[in-house]
Image (cartoon, rainbow, N blue to C red):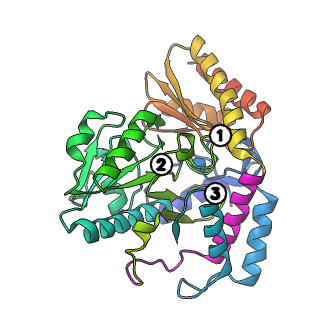
């Protein structure tokens, strides 16, 4: 089919929940993707921080074929090897925990909300049910996850939201004292680096205060590392920058290199309240997804991709800051590792479109922030190419 035919069929048969540009991507290789006409684009969005190893990765292709030939699905009713091996790998490189596998970031948030509310109910009664989250966060689009997302635009037309949600400003310590209660609060959930909300890092002093307050008031601390975890910020997990361990951590996006998977890692005091039947997932812990995820995480660790993200992310940040010196419409360049936001004075939609026309894929994080989340395997030449294309776009505005 042609590009025009595919787009026409989509308009006829696909639910209109996205506004897609008039291009159909057909294949990918390394840091590049190609459309149906064969045009090449440098991918600096990485499937929204999913394709951390790039496209057409031999280890991923091999792992898919290997496990698919053995066993694709049997359900969570039975023991399989891949999810046990993956859980062991994650725990050995994070903190002592038990792991629940699901199929997406939103599902991992739903599970984290249920698990922490169950724990809080058993330790403090049903009154201890509130979930504290932070403005401009994004935790997903399923009902509990979007209720936890403190952005009103995502709530419009879907109210009432799940009750018991408390929204606070990020990085402001003073409101925490009153809002986080030993009697009412089950959990506090925070992204160490906010992704969709503008690429906003949480300050280390803020995270330390949260950890201390949660300990004092017997409240679970959830770190949503769906976008910022797994080497993206320069550590395998973002919490490791400061050594502030959560009680619960959610993972997804890059975990299986492009296959759907989510995970919830929880410390023993949370896990021990769970019983069979309290939660589940037909497709969770899928053997193919877990086998591939084990290969992806192993490659991340073995090839030192966290250090690489820190190094090449520094070079990308420097290049973007150089653009900011000559383009006054750039307000700030911020982020961590290879999760970078460029805040402009005005909306960035036209810039994103012009970059794509120029052969560079970038995204947005709110109306005014251009987001870069490229594969962690990019090189200096890719940085130079991306900065050159963006600079050319800005020069013509």
Of helix, strand and loop, which one carries label 2? loop
Residue pointed to by mark 2: 19
Q: In the drawing, does residue 325 fall left or right of residue 346? A: right
Image coords of residue 189 (percent x, y): 37, 51
Front position among marks 3 and 1: 3
**Category of crowding for the residue at label 2, using alpha-carbon neighbours closer than 10 angstroms: few (below 14), some (14–19), many (at least 20):** few
Judging depth in this view, the residue of 117 and 336 nearest the camera is 117
Query: In the image, which is nearer the foreground, mark 2 or mark 1?
Result: 1
Q: Give the side of residue 242 with respect to residue 296, left or right.
A: left
Position of residue 309 measured from the top left corner of the image (x, y, whole percent): 68, 39
Query: Which numbered marker is on residue 320?
Result: none
Q: Nearer the viewer, mark 2 or mark 3?
A: 3
Q: Which residue is mark 3?
A: 93
Residue 8 within the magenta-colored segment of the rendering: no
- Relative image position of residue 28 (x, y in whole percent): 74, 52
Quarter of the image containing the C terminus? Answer: top right
Q: Which residue is mark 1?
A: 44
Q: Up-down: is 155 above or below 360?
A: below
**Residue at 49 percent of width and 66 percent of height:** 13
Q: Residues within 10 Å of mark 3 (few under 14, many from 20)?
A: few
Q: Residue at (75%, 83%) from the top-left corner?
A: 70
Label 3 to label 1, Cα distance in Å?
27 Å
The local crowd at label 1, few if under 14, some if 14 to 19, many if 20 or more residues have their Cα within 10 Å, is many
Rounded to the nearest whole Å, what is the CA distance between mark 2 and mark 3? 39 Å
SS for callout 1: loop
Q: Earlier in the sequence, mark 2 or mark 3?
A: 2
Q: Are marks 3 and 1 in contact (CB under 8 Å)?
A: no
203 left or right of 228? left
Residue 396 is at least partly visible in this image: no
Magenta segment boundaries in residue numbering: 277-302
Label 3 SS: loop
Q: Residue at x 76, y 81 (%)?
A: 69
């Amino acid at each position: 089919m042609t590009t025009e035919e595919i787009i026409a069929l989509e308009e006829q048969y696909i639910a209109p929940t996205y506004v897609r540009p008039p291009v159909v991507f057909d294949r990918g290789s390394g840091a590049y993707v190609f459309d149906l006409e064969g045009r090449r684009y440098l991918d600096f969005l990485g499937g929204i921080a999913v394709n951390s190893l790039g496209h057409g990765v031999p280890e991923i292709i091999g792992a898919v074929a290997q496990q698919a030939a053995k066993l694709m699905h049997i359900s969570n009713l039975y023991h399989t090897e891949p999810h046990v091996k993956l859980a062991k790998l994650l725990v050995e490189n994070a903190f002592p925990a038990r792991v629940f596998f699901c199929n997406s970031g939103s599902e991992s948030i739903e599970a984290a909300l249920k698990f922490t509310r169950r724990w809080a109910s058993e330790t403090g009664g049903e009154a201890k049910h509130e979930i504290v989250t932070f403005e401009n966060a994004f935790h997903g689009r399923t009902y509990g996850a979007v209720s936890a997302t403190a952005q009103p635009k995502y709530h419009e037309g879907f109210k009432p939201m799940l009750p018991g949600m408390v929204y606070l400003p990020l990085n402001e310590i003073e409101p925490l004292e009153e809002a986080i209660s030993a009697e009412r609060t089950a959990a506090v959930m925070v992204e160490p680096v906010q992704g969709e909300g503008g690429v906003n890092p949480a300050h280390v002093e803020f995270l330390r205060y949260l950890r201390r307050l949660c300990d004092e008031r017997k409240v679970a601390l959830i770190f949503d590392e769906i976008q910022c975890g797994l080497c993206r910020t320069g550590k395998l997990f973002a919490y490791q920058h400061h050594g502030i361990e959560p009680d619960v951590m959610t993972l997804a996006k890059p975990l299986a290199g492009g296959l759907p998977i989510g995970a919830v890692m929880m410390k023993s005091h949370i896990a021990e309240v769970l019983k069979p039947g309290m939660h589940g997932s037909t497709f969770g812990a899928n053997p193919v997804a877990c086998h591939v995820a084990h290969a992806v995480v192993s490659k991340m660790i073995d090839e030192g991709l966290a250090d690489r993200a820190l190094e090449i992310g520094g070079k990308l940040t420097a290049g973007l800051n150089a653009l900011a010196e000559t383009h006054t419409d750039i307000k700030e360049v911020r982020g961590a590792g290879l999760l970078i936001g460029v805040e402009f004075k005005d909306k960035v939609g036209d810039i994103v479109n012009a970059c794509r026309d120029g052969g560079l894929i970038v995204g947005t994080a709110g109306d005014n922030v251009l987001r870069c989340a490229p594969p962690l395997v990019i090189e200096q030449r890719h940085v130079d190419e991306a900065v050159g294309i963006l600079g050319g776009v800005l020069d013509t505005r």
